[in-house]
Image: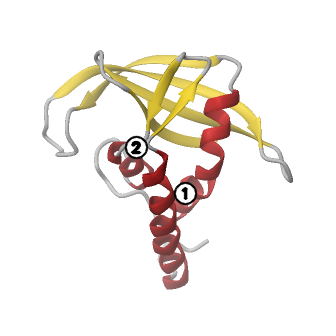
Amino acid sequence: MDKNDPEQIEYCNILASTQRTVYDTIRSVYCPILRVDVVFNARGFHHLLYDSSGTARNVCERIYKLTLMPLVIPVIKNALSVKDERDVSVRISRKKNSLKKDGKTYALSSIVGRKNPVAVRVIILRIGTGNYMFRSVMKD
């Protein structure tokens, strides 16, 4: 895939728009393994398109993450354990020089999909004592 291909860029933009519409309807999903509601906010969707430093992901990465979005809810609902926990330092806002706060990420993994089952990992973020938020998705 050529990351500068106009067709790929157009496809990525359409995919981002349609996935954003679906994403905005989710609000939150109960996670049995963490025993909490996982919130789907603008911060999570932003992280699909931009990395932690605020730099735009390339078109291939964006398409990769956006096409996995339909599998996020099944992973959150069906994960049998927390695969990994990490202490992290996260910017309070999206601005590059904003203050950082301590947080924790939780990696949930599950095999999902009916036609072509695939192992998918979903990252959940909690900053301080705040909400558990969707952060990212990738193949496991």
Residue identifier under label 1: 66
| Within-10-Å neighbours for mark 1: few <14, some 14–19, many 20+ | many
Residue found 49% across the figure and 84% down from its top: 6
Name the residue carrying label 2: 44
Q: Quadrant of the N terminus?
A: bottom right
Residue at the image position 45 percent from the left and 68 percent from the top: 17
| Figure check: 82 above or below 110 | above
* Tally of marks: 2
Q: Secondary structure at mark 1?
A: helix
**Is 109 located above or below residue 46 in the figure?**
above
Counting from the top left corner in percent of width and height, residue 132 is at 41, 26
Does 85 sit left or right of 73 as displayed? Answer: left
- Indicate which disc, 1 or 2, sits on the residue closer to the N terminus: 2
Q: Is residue 114 left or right of residue 3?
A: right
The image position of residue 129, as x and y in percent, is 30, 15
Q: Which mark is residue 4?
A: none
Query: x, y (%) of residue 27?
Result: 43, 42
Compared with 132, 70 (above or below) is: below
Quadrant placement of the C terminus: top right
x, y percent for residue 93: 20, 39
